[in-house]
Amino acid sequence: MSVAAASLLGMVSIPRQRRPLGRRDLTPPTTGRPVQLALDELGKPLSDVTFVVVDLETTGGTPGSCAITEIGAVKVRGGEVLGEFQTLVDPGGPVPAFISVLTGITTSMVIGAPRIAEVLPSFLEFARGSVLVAHNAPFDIGFLKAAAAETGYSWPGNQVLDTVRLARRVVTRDEAPNHKLGTLAALFRATVTPDHRALSDARATVDVLHALLSRLAPLGITHLEDLASATDPVPSDVRRKRHLADGLPDAPGVYMFRGPHEEVLYVGTSTSIRTRVRSYFTAAEKRARMTEMVRIAHAVTPVVCATPLEARVRELRLIAEHSPRYNRRSRFPERMPWVRLTHEPYPRLSIVREVRLDGGEGTSGSVSAHIGPFASQGAAQSAIDALHETFAIRQCTPRLPLVAAASASGCARAEMGRCAAPCTGHQDPGAYGDVVHAVRSAMLSDPSAVVGAHATRIATLVAEERFEEAGAVRDRLTAFLRGAARAQRLSPLSACPELVAARQSPDGGWEVVLIRYARLAATARVGRTDNPWPVIESLRLSAEHVDRPVAPAPAGHPEEADLLLAWLDSPGVRLVEAPEGWACPVRGAQSCVGSEATAASVSAYLASALPDDAGSRVRAHAVGAA
């Protein structure tokens, strides 16, 4: 027995009297003084746990393409060796030369050895009911699980302990340069030196395990149940906040982490509020910002929702309402810019914060063409640049009169021939109106002119091997297509007073959604055996009143409208009622959105414009750039 093992035994093997629990013991007393729990009642002491320390030698590092050549295992409990298991395994093929050099196991040694299908049942019986231990456990256990699946044996699901992860918890860099088995065995003065043979390495790992457990004992790791958190990197002050998840519902909805002054720190959503909130106090949460937020949080407020769609919509609304400092997205929807074709004698393109009627509020004026909203000012400017590159629409900002003044002079762009100069009267309103009509068509219905101009430019740049410039042109085209597609999808839904749709839920019922002007007004679940029409009528009567917006702007958060559109496009959704219809342009920008769709659009244009063999080569490079 090693010194470390003896130390472990002396630390946790405390003589105590045991007796069976009866009914009286299970009934909490109503009187008397508090009694401290015995160690046995806290869990199973590590001195009573049976560990099977296993090590494998293989023909390589990947379970799918490599095989086991040797299995070695040692069964220990309370620092005492109960048994050992060792056998060579025929991998079904030659042992690679570099493996033979490393382990000393050659092809001739494994010829005649049992195959893994014969060895595995014996090993599983040897390890039955124990905690499996390995140094770099994912490697060894991964090979064993793959062997079980290959041979048709079910994996028993033993608890697994990785000594590498334990060592990272208690062995510092000052003590050892790394956490390799040889390094740790030397540090803890193991009785066996690892030599890349399965049984020797398993014996060395036993000594390393005992030494690590002796170091963990002062940290409170003295029982089997403690091992689950022994390798948990979660800080103790974060783990202590686990009680915030107590009592939360196991249902879809929204949760809000609140700070000391009831301020909302973070808003999230999940199909199970309780499960999701619990994950913030475990190693599954790896974001430093979230760890900082949990340290500040004092409470979690749940909002149960009827459907996952409602939960996601409520999340957006709460983020927009509270602007939690730990939420990064969707905090300021009013800052999302649009690109507008202005309403004046000589229209131009401008970036605006909201969509308004041309005559102003309170009028019955028309609405100019808009695309967007965009995620940033830069994206909106890129879309404008794409339109300027395609059409000869003016780029100056002053409002021009219908009749130019006699003293008017052209700008630098006019002198360079890059503007028709309607400001000086060189371009009559009719000719300029044709340009404006083409711009409006590209923004609202058919982007083919913009795609064609950019495809030609990309092809030219690629032929000259100016790939970075071609990429910049592609980015401008992409920004325009995304903004135009978003507006073309939002506009019909934003103009729809009411739309009712339904999707069948997994339990056979229906998820009913009522949308007004691209805002979720009501939602409900209908049972599998219930008549949905009374529920729909009830939703219509009790739904939120929504004021009509100025389309294409939706009545709610633009991202809420995107969620509704994505839900409406999802498989299985049925339109129940849409009195005023709901449709998008057939040749709209949506058909060109996405890297593959954009590349296909560029390729299709170039195929018609450059049909020869040289054009084929240019098209191939241009599609790659797009």
Image (cartoon, rainbow, N blue to C red):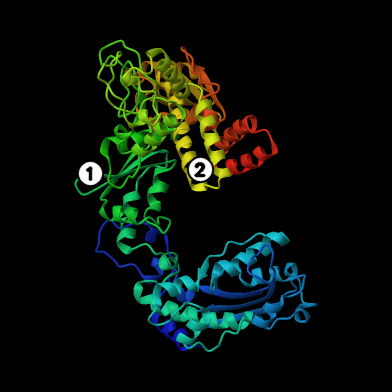
Question: Which image quadrant: the C terminus?
Answer: top right
Q: Nearer the viewer, residue 359 or 262?
A: 359
Q: Amino acid at mark 1?
A: Glu
Q: Residue at x 37, y 35 (%)?
A: 381
| Residue at the far left in the pictured view | 261
Say above or below: 107 vs 159: below
- Which residue position is annotated with label 2? 470
The residue carrying pointer 2 sits among few (fewer than 14), some (14 to 19) or many (20 or more) residues within 10 Å by Cα, namely many
Say above or below: 553 vs 365: below
Labelled disc at residue 440: none
Q: Amino acid at mark 2?
A: Ala
Give how far across and how far down residue 210 sits, in percent. Answer: 47, 80
Task: Decide if residue 29 is on the left or right side of residue 575.
Answer: left
Q: Residue at x 62, y 32 (%)?
A: 604
The answer to whether one can see residue 388 in this image is yes
State the separation of the CA atoms marked 1 and 2. Answer: 48 Å
Task: Decide if residue 296 is on the left or right side of residue 111.
Answer: left
Give how far across and how far down residue 535 sits, in percent. Answer: 44, 19
Q: Residue at x 56, y 87 (%)?
A: 193
Give how far across and how far down residue 470 sits, in percent. Answer: 51, 43
- Which residue position is annotated with label 1? 263
Q: Earlier in the sequence, mark 1 or mark 2?
A: 1
Give how far across and how far down residue 169 sits, in percent. Answer: 40, 72
Task: Decide if residue 253 is on the left or right side of residue 180.
Answer: left
The residue carrying pointer 1 sits among few (fewer than 14), some (14 to 19) or many (20 or more) residues within 10 Å by Cα, namely some
Judged by depth in the image, the label closer to the viewer, 1 or 2, is 2
Q: Are marks 1 and 2 in contact (CB under 8 Å)?
A: no
Say above or below: 119 vs 566: below
Mark 1: secondary structure: loop
Residue 612, image quadrant:
top right
| Residue at the far top in the pictured view | 364
Q: Residue at x 48, y 74 (%)?
A: 48
